[in-house]
Amino acid sequence: MSVTTLHDPAVRGFASDNYSGVHPEVLAAIEAANGGHQIAYGEDVYTARLQDVLAQHFGAGVEAFPVFNGTGANVTALQSMLPRWGAVIAASSAHINVDEGGAPERVGGMKLLTVPAEDGKLTPELVDREAWGWGDEHRAQPLVVSITQSTELGTLYTPDEVRALADHAHGHGMRLHLDGARISNAAASLDVPLAAFTRDAGVDVLSFGGTKNGALGAEAIVVLEPAASAGLTYLRKLNMQLASKMRFVSAQLVALLEGDLWLRNARHSNAMAQRLRGGVEAGLADGSVRGVAFTQPTQANGVFATLPGVVADRLRESFRFYDWSGSDAARREVRWMCSFDTTEHDVDAFVAAIARETSAS
Ligand SMILES: Cc1ncc(COP(=O)(O)O)c(C=O)c1O
């Protein structure tokens, strides 16, 4: 072996579900797809299989465009849904607004019309704050609503809530995009098929996330309503998201979606978040934990809380995690994320550290 392991694989934190590695079954799928020659740029048998697998999940007629990352999926998907003068309505906490370096505006050339949403979720009423001005040449035209499931704040839309947004958007001639970087966590938590809150609920185009759920860098734009999107074949290349050796991206998504790996991984990371929340709540109840307050319901694999800044800083000496970037810095809100490989032991050790540090403060 020419590369030695440079890190300690036993060290895990709660900073991001992207801190985890690759699930062994996904690595095995990459290995299985290796060897020999396959047609480049997506005309390989693994990408063909991915289309079939996605059709099993989302229904016949859907089309997938594998890409490298979530920002690329979002920007390219949204661009395909908009004319040059189009705008996207999104929650101000949306990844496209907070964490994509301005790529939707600068690379995609679209305007974002953002609305504050306490729990990260849009409603038809919130959409209406920006859904106006069609036909006014002075206003970027609101033509797409983008929601995230599970949200950046670890909350969930029910299928009925997505349906209400889709109906509302469509009623105004707008389309609905869903950022599904954590779509598997949402389906696992809601205990419904992936289609229940996407295609069946009226979502037009989806950014399907694989990376946070055990892949190495595999996402896909999934067009659920062909009339809602145009030019993806060209836009994906233009946006530098066209993989030459696409078989390895597709094989990862097939590995997740062909069986139940997507669900096993998502159920596990959700369960670890519940364990973390439950452990801290139990500590608050028996007095072993002090000064921690939860800021959001824990519905997927993220836990959001406030705690004294000195305590957070001391805790970080043993477990990495971030202040939540979407929040007012003075609030010192933190985000604790669990991954498919977070163990019960990791969670229990973290809860014990929270108890130790909060009672020492
Ligand atoms: C909600 C959401 N969307 C999209 C992404 C994808 O981002 P990236 O471009 O880092 O893969 C992330 C990752 O943090 C995310 O949390």
Image (cartoon, grey):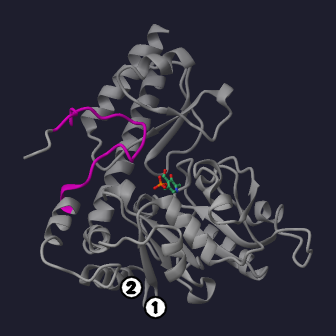
Residue 175 placement: quadrant: bottom right
- Mark 1 burial class by Cα count in 10 Å: few <14, some 14-19, many 20+: some
Q: Is residue 254 left or right of residue 338?
A: left
Element type at mark 2? helix
Viewer-proximal residue, 344 or 170? 170
- Mark 2 burial class by Cα count in 10 Å: few <14, some 14-19, many 20+: some
What amino acid does circle 2 point to? Answer: Ala
- Asked if residue 121 can be seen in this view, the reply is yes
Query: Chief secondary structure of the magenta span?
Result: loop
Q: Which mark is residue 234?
A: none
Q: Position of residue 291 (x, y in %)?
A: 55, 20
Which residue has dot 2 on it?
55
Q: Residue at 26% of width from left, 71% of height from top?
A: 251
Q: Position of residue 195 (x, y in %)?
A: 46, 77
- Earlier in the chain: of badge 2 and badge 1, it is 2
Q: Residue at 42% of width from left, 37% of height from top?
A: 15
Q: Position of residue 218 (x, y in %)?
A: 36, 64
Residues shaded magenta: 5-25
Q: Which mark is residue 61?
A: 1
Q: Residue at 31% of width from left, 50% of height from top?
A: 340
Query: Vertical placement of 298 versus 305: above or below?
Result: below
Query: Vertical placement of 231 versus 190: above or below?
Result: below
Q: Is residue 273 left or right of residue 75?
A: left
Q: CA distance from mark 2 to mark 1?
A: 7 Å
Q: Residue at 44% of width from left, 37% of height from top?
A: 277
Residue 142 placement: quadrant: bottom right
Query: Vertical placement of 104 versus 47: above or below?
Result: above
